[in-house]
Image (spheres, rainbow, N blue to C red):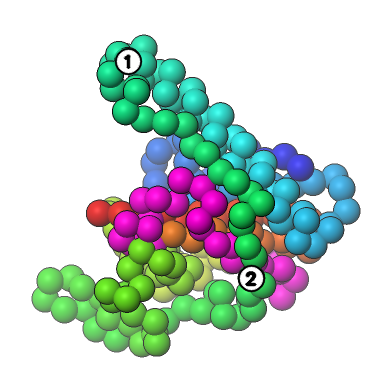
Amino acid sequence: MKEITKDTFYDFIRPYDLDDEYYFVGEVDYHLLKSDKPYEGLQSHREALIVIFDRLAENSIEDLKSIRERCGDDAADKLSPLVYDIDKAQPTPLDPNEFFYCPNIVKIDYYGNVYYDAEWKPNDENFGTKVPYWYAVMEPVHGRRNKPEEFKKVNEVLFPNGTGALDIYEWTTDWSDLFDAGHEWYGACCWSIYDKSMNRYVVMLVSATD
């Protein structure tokens, strides 16, 4: 299995985040992959996560080297490379209709706060746990908020043949320090999706704090 580095989906979402090293919409970091091997269910999903986190760990090591060269040992020694233990990651299958649920906006107040007709709402009890996919796209910590129609369009481009042929898993997030920031406040999420119609995998990661 290997990452897809060029895709029309990446071109489409580029205006949402101009950092050419990442592919974000809201707080969701998207990674596309493909494999020449037959789909093996959960094992293939786990392999997709390994490919992504191996690369992220390698990038973090290179970033540390760069910081050491530019800022010295004192700055670099305060940081550490990304670590993960995929054996600790526990999956839960998700229904596509629930995963792609998109609420409607019912009110925007004087201060710009947006209110939705969704049952799930951010509060002190669920901060630092996980957030719905729609919320991660539409209500980021910083930067551009996205409207329901934009959420729907992103997914139409990502899954051009519809969502009926998707296998989706939500993973626990206690197996990598990548998710530490999200555990502090906003939330942390890890989803893997296999699109049977395109023989393509998507890994989505969320981890943000204020």
Q: Which residue is most to the left?
A: 110
- Residue 109 placement, left or right of 46: left
Compared with 29, 20 (above or below) is: above
Extent of the magenta region: 160-187
Of residue 192 and residue 110, the one placed in the foreground of this image is 192
Q: Name the image quarter holding residue 106.
A: bottom left
Residue 149: give x, y in percent of width and height: 44, 72
Of residue 62 and residue 151, the one placed in the foreground of this image is 62
Q: Name the amino acid, label 2.
A: Thr
Residues at marks 2 and 1, CA–CA distance in whole angstroms: 42 Å
Q: Which residue is drawn at 77% across and 54% down?
A: 44
Disc 2 marks which residue? 92
Magenta includes 48?
no
Disc 1 marks which residue? 73
Count the numbered circles shown: 2
Assign the N terminus to one quadrant of the image. Answer: top right
Q: Is mark 2 on a helix, strand or loop?
A: strand
Compared with 141, 71 (above or below) is: above
* Earlier sequence position, callout 2 versus callout 1: 1
- Residue 153 placement, left or right of 67: right
Residue 8: give x, y in percent of width and height: 61, 48
